[in-house]
Image (cartoon, grey):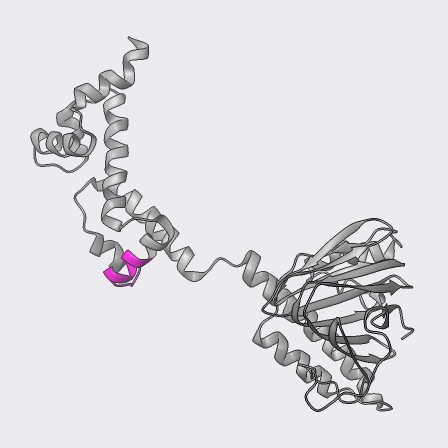
Amino acid sequence: MKTALQIDIAQVFDQPISPRTDTLKPSISMSNADYQHYENQHGQACLQQFDGMLGYINILDLHLPADIVIPMQVTASDIHIFYLLTEDRAIQIRDVQKRISYSISCNRGRYFYLTRSDYEIHVPAGRYTLINFYFRGSIFRDGNERPFQFLHALIHAYRKHDPNSWCSIDFRAGTRTISLLKTIASKIKKGDLDSEVNILWGIKKLIQLSKEKIFEEYDKISESQIKSKEAHAAIKQAVAELGQDFKLEDIAWQFGISMDYLHQLIQLYYGQSPQKLKVEFMLDLAKKYIVDGMPTDAIAYELGYASPSSFARFFKKKTGMTATEFFKRNNQDYL
């Protein structure tokens, strides 16, 4: 593949030098790639590059005592993946002509459609590994891009030769991503025809993994969240049908969970215990009945109390008002 992205590391670090045994080592080694080591007052850098027919790989390691800006040139519009592995800070990729900046946060990845332009990589002081794959957008054809909604805008821009750059939402780059990146790097060999197949295989695997990461982070509703919503609705329905005359243990049994787990679910997603939620629903219903003008004895019956006085004590304790006082306060505008 023709080189379409050039990281001009020499502008910051001058000419490459022979590494010493104690110098910066790549965090992901691509042993058969072109390798260059740099070191001066700005810090240390290792740049590994592999040029394949179907894709291009850059792995840049940096150890910096102070912030730097690295020039980067893009000579042809392509789709890129960038991963930033660090415990330090986010970096910025800036389009110099259009004065637009894109961020890549710590231990996260992001896809870009980058157009022909001059760019800058703004890197704060710290230890970083920046991994870049780029490939022709033409690998997406015959509708095979449909499952990857997060790439649709970038693919559309590539096909229409959009003069503006685009980026996807970002996503986590954790243990699975790093393991896959290391596997891809280990399969790269100069002069080996299988390397071309392996690059395409690697890009496809990264795209599929990105889809999973984005689903997990942005789209997936966890099983516990679903169950908590169902339990919340079940408690509300039980109050509407039975008032206080039901046990929360019956709700737990209905969902095949323990009372402890029911408490954990409701507390986690609604910030209160199941018992407090039950009381809240009962109060809401009681207030509605009072405002609607329902007699106290009828309300007591609807809410499962043995007598109107029992309901009156409950309502007074929870609101500080009698039913009559509450009715007057909420209906005074209509008197």
- In the figure, residue 328 lies in which quadrant? top left
Q: Is residue 207 left or right of residue 13?
A: left
- Residue 262 falls within the magenta-colored stretch: yes
- Residue 114 percent across, percent down from the top left: 82, 59
- Residue 74 percent across, percent down from the top left: 88, 63
Q: Please determine whether, in this image, residue 333 is positioned above or below residue 51.
A: above
Q: Please determine whether, in this image, residue 255 is positioned above or below residue 329.
A: below
Q: Residue at x 78, y 56 (%)?
A: 94
Q: Is residue 261 left or right of residue 19?
A: left
Q: Residue at x 29, y 58 (%)?
A: 262
Q: Read off the magenta span.
A: 254-264
Q: Residue at x 74, y 87 (%)?
A: 187
Q: Please determine whether, in this image, residue 21 is positioned above or below residue 81.
A: below
166 and 44: which is toward the camera: 44
- Residue 265 falls within the magenta-colored stretch: no
Q: Please determine whether, in this image, residue 95 is positioned above or below residue 292.
A: below
- Residue 314 percent across, percent down from the top left: 14, 34
Q: Where, quadrant-wise, is the C terminus in this rendering? A: top left
The rendered magenta stretch, by its main secondary structure, is classed as: helix
Q: Where, quadrant-wise, is the N terminus in this rendering? A: bottom right
